[in-house]
Image (cartoon, grey):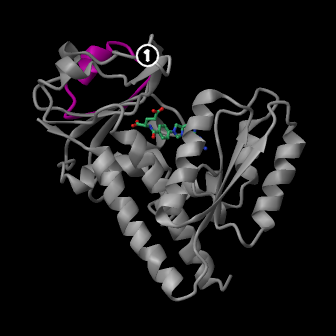
């Protein structure tokens, strides 16, 4: 059994990006600039955005955190997005999800300039991804592909079962794993809350990608020998530690890891990869903007 070490790989990627940024600096070129918009003060969201900003600093990117109150109206957020769209200094930006109830998420994601949409959530970019055109691939799916690639996990002709059909992970992942190429060429089954007999389906999977958010959902009995297990779940479970919680995935790691050929841990698996790939998309955005001379 091999642990897919997202912490290590994300560090390697950050070092590669930093080397690119150092070259830009040596040539007196503008470095990539990422902005992150956060509405409200949900603890988990703040932690993630904080990690993104710190990652920018680590690789030498400029970063801007835009904090808006939880009572921000949709119009106010759309105005902010327009400002970021027009600001030539910003190469890419993200709107941290979930958004408060008064704001229509679809409307907001459509307002982001597709050329700055480093999350890859705009329908134009999602469509390009589905059509194999070059675009920003959403950071979490992109991170999973990168892990599979760097560990040379064979996906060709394999049966990949995805648990969860979210717009951010499950749905794009189902498209990416079925695309031509490597990683890809899988036969994909997308399962969700209305799926019947899920154990029967997961038991036949060569690769399982779980993006559900239910601790200990995937148990050893649901997995065949030598399966590849990608755990995208991140749940906070209350405990009496200093933090007041611990982080766990969807997978019963202790027992499932005994059967798996490859498995991602939580923390230290897909999470850190998400951050690294957001940086990679921002670098890509800068390169595109440089070619347009700005
Ligand atoms: N517009 C938008 N883009 C996102 O990419 C986005 C989002 N909204 N909303 C929420 C999810 C979640 N997400 C994570 C990023 C890093 C870790 C991460 O670094 N996890 C660490 C542990 C972090 C901890 O200790 O809490 C790990 O797994 O090792 C996790 C989750 C990005 N998301």
Q: x, y percentage for residue 41? A: 71, 31
286 with respect to 77 (left or right): left
Q: Which residues are magenta?
A: 190-208
Determine if residue 5 is in view. yes
Determine if residue 203 is in view. no
Number of numbered discs visible in the structure rendering: 1
Q: Which quarter of the figure is the N terminus placed in?
A: top left
Q: Residue at x 32, y 16 (%)?
A: 198
Figure check: 28 above or below 127: below
Q: x, y percentage for residue 293? A: 66, 86
Q: In the rendered image, which quarter is residue 38 located in?
A: top right
Q: x, y percentage for residue 53? A: 58, 52
Figure check: 146 above or below 193: below
Asked if disc 1 is less than 8 Å from ligand 1, the answer is: no
Q: Residue at x 65, y 33 (%)?
A: 98
Q: Relative to the observer, which residue lies in front, 133 or 237?
A: 237
Asked which secondary structure carries label 1, the reply is loop
200 magenta-colored: yes
Q: Relative to the observer, which residue lies in front, 154 or 8?
A: 8
Q: Residue at x 37, y 13 (%)?
A: 196
Figure check: 166 above or below 75: above
41 with respect to 189 (left or right): right
Question: Which residue is denoted by mark 1 in the rendering?
Answer: 241
Q: What is the crowding at mark 1: few (fewer than 14 residues within 10 Å), some, or many (at least 20)?
A: few
Q: x, y percentage for residue 99? A: 71, 33
Q: Which quarter of the figure is the C terminus placed in?
A: bottom right
Q: In the rendered image, which quarter is residue 180 located in?
A: bottom left
64 magenta-colored: no
């Amino acid at each position: 059994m091999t642990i897919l070490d997202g912490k290590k790989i994300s560090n390697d990627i950050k070092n590669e990006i930093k080397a690119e940024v150092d070259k830009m600096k040596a040539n007196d070129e503008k470095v990539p600039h990422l902005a992150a918009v956060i509405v409200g003060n949900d603890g988990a969201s703040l932690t993630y955005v904080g990690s993104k900003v710190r990652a920018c600093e680590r690789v030498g990117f400029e970063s801007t955190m835009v904090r808006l109150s939880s009572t921000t109206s949709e119009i106010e957020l759309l105005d902010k997005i327009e400002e970021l769209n027009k600001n030539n200094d910003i190469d890419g930006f993200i709107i941290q999800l979930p958004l408060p109830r008064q704001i229509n998420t679809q409307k907001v994601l459509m307002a982001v300039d597709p050329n700055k949409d480093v999350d890859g959530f705009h329908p134009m970019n999602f469509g390009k991804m589905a059509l194999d055109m070059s675009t920003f691939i959403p950071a979490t799916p992109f991170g999973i592909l990168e892990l599979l690639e760097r560990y040379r996990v064979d996906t060709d002709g394999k049966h990949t079962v995805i648990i969860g059909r979210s717009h951010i992970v499950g749905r794009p992942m189902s498209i990416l794993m079925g695309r031509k190429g490597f990683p890809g060429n899988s036969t994909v089954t997308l399962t969700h809350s209305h799926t019947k007999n899920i154990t029967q389906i997961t038991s036949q999977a060569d690769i399982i990608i779980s993006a559900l958010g239910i601790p200990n959902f995937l148990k050893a009995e649901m997995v065949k020998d030598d399966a590849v297990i990608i755990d995208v779940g991140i749940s906070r479970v209350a405990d009496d530690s200093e933090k007041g919680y611990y982080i766990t995935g969807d997978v019963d790691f202790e027992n499932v890891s005994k059967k798996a050929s490859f498995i991602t841990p939580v923390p230290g698996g897909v999470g850190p990869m998400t951050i690294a790939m957001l940086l990679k998309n921002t670098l890509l955005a800068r390169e595109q903007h440089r070619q347009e001379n700005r």
